[in-house]
Image (cartoon, grey):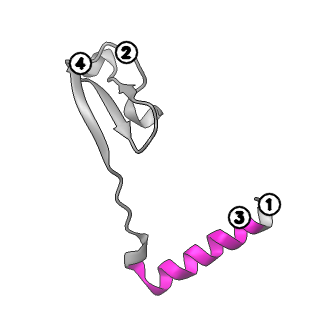
Amino acid sequence: MTQESVKAALLSAIESIKANPDAARAVYLVDTKLVEDVRCSANARDFAPMTVDQPMGMGGHVVSHHVVQH
């Protein structure tokens, strides 16, 4: 995509949401499994599973990124 086509798509989405704010709602489904302590395995759509952990100060072991770092 060119910058102009990205800009056009974003402006179109903005106008659609202005006209119908409920169109901005999104649902993301993720299947998570607790592995150990606060470390989890997460699967989203057709992507490979990812491990999510917390910093040591929050009970984790820092074996993977925090969820907001992915």
Residue tagged by mark 2? 62
Q: Secondary structure at mark 1?
A: loop
Residue tagged by mark 4? 59
Q: Which label belongs to residue 45? A: none
Q: Nearer the viewer, mark 2 or mark 1?
A: 1
- 8 left or right of 52 in image: right
Are the two marked residues, 4 and 2, in contact with CB atoms closer than 8 angstroms? Answer: no
Please tell me how crowded label 2 is: few (under 14), some (14-19), or many (20+) other residues with Cα within 10 Å. Answer: some
The amino acid at mark 4 is Gly
Q: Give the magenta-colored segment's residue range.
A: 5-21
Q: Nearer the viewer, mark 4 or mark 3?
A: 3
* Residue 16 magenta: yes
Q: Secondary structure at mark 3?
A: helix
Q: Name the quadrant containing residue 7.
A: bottom right
Residue tagged by mark 1? 2
Q: Which mark is first along the chain, 1 or 2? A: 1
Residue tagged by mark 3? 6
Front residue of this view, candidates 66 and 58: 66
**Magenta-highlighted stretch: main secondary structure?**
helix
Q: Spatial distance from mark 2 to mark 1, Cα to Cα?
A: 39 Å
